[in-house]
Image (spheres, rainbow, N blue to C red):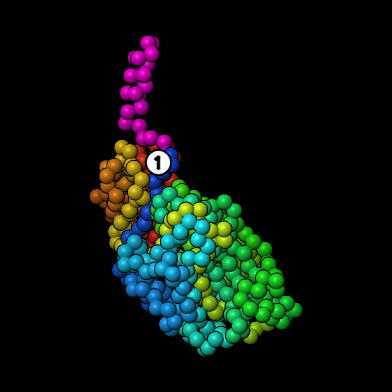
Amino acid sequence: MKPLLAMLWLSLALEGRAAPASDANPPLRVASITPAARQPAQRDPAVIFYDDFAAAPEAGSLRYLEYDLAGGSFVWTPDGGLNGGAMRCQFARGQVEAGSLKVLFGRNPLNRGIRRDETFDEIYWRVYVKHEAGWEGNPAKLARATCLAGEDWSQGMIAHVWGGPGDTLCIDPATGIRNGVKVTAHYNDFDQLTWLGLRNGQTPIFSPAESGRWVCVESHVKLNRSGRGDGCFELWVDGRLEASRTNLDWHGTWSAYAINAVFLENYWNGGSVKPQARWLDDFVISTRPIGPILATTPPVVTRTSGAAGTGWEAEVASDPEGRDVVWRSKPMAADAMKLTVDSTGGEFSGSRAGKTGLAAGQDYWTRIRRRGESEWAPWHAPFRQ
């Protein structure tokens, strides 16, 4: 074949095929699932605290012990959230501290906060986080649950959820109790803390491929019973257990206070590698497992803004491994940004074959790909129906 004809044949053969993902054409992800107007956390008696950021938080209010705006880096925005308002953190290049929100609850030495006549030995907390498209770097701190054990903010225990290796999260538990005595004398008294063993997560939520989408991060802490090493610390990302520590001795026999605070943090030890933003939304603290957002009925799926080539398609499964695919979309046009999970937008299959909708009270996971690509995105964007 002559060179010119060979080039023409290759051009025709490639026409209509989806281009491989690149930095300029990142892989598609499900950006979000539209939440229902009312969420279970709004009426669940197990919920200690809930903020969907429909309005800006107030510093020094009953709801928040502290709200650090970091000079305007961490502010409320009326849009950009899952369904309206959210907290937006804007890092400047090299910026380390970029704001935080601190919730105080249960018995505590500051005699402030929510439900301060109660003792909480076990909590779950969940927050949604989204990093802007093209995000780079691991910002080190995301959240922690702790026991404030003195007016000096000394701590009995800290359950850190922060940056792990590469682009993942990790859990890193620590105690300020030794031989039944509190040994910490101030906040983050690292010289006196005993570290109980780090565990790494798995999903690279800080990678460019996972940027531009909402990630569901849920954590669980249970204190040990007096004198027993039976406490635990767990981390779920998008409804999948990713890190776990059991047989933890958080407090020994010390029992002056229990878990009484959860902090959301934007603190980057080495400073941000460039100007970039992330958002936090739908923050819940509860005494029972929380899970993902409750979606509208039928659910509405929004994709990330990357180019879709010749179009795209999505699937829904009833488990995070995709063993039971319950709905497959029809081919979507390249300029379409949303689809509805119903009989018009696709076909029900698996355990929902022959049905006209998803089952109420069930958790589901989604995945997406460009038409013509062989590989799907990992199962992510969980929701409850």
Residue at 43%, 39% in the rendered image: 22
Which residue position is annotated with label 1? 24
| Relative image position of residue 259 (x, y in whole percent) | 57, 78
Marks counted in the figure total 1
The image position of residue 291, as x and y in percent, is: 45, 65
Kind of element beneath mark 1: loop
- Identify the residue at the far right of this view: 179
Give the camera-side residue of 348 and 85.
85
Residue 169 appears left or right of 173: left
Say which of 194 and 380 sits in front.
194
Give x and y (percent) for residue 250. Answer: 66, 74
- Above or below residue 218? Residue 262 is below
Asked if the stretch drawn in magenta spans residue 16, the answer is yes
Q: Residue at x 69, y 81 (%)?
A: 182
**Does the magenta segment cover residue 64?**
no
Quarter of the picture holding the C terminus: bottom left
> Position of 105 compared to 363: left or right?
right
Residue 327 can be seen, yes or no: no
Residue shown at 29%/42% (left/top)?
Answer: 334
Q: Residues within 10 Å of mark 1 (few under 14, many from 20)?
A: few
In the rendered image, the vertical position of residue 310 relative to residue 354, given as above or below: above
Find the residue positioned furthest to the top: 2
* Amino acid type for the residue under numbered disc 1: Ala
Quadrant of the rendered image containing residue 232: bottom right
Q: Is residue 275 above or below residue 25?
A: below
Q: Quadrant of residue 308?
A: top left
Residue 67 appears in the figure: yes
Q: What segment is highlighted magenta in the picture? A: 1-21
Query: Which residue is rendered at x = 43% and y = 49% of the image?
Result: 134
Picture quarter containing residue 82?
Answer: bottom left
Q: Residue furthest left?
A: 344
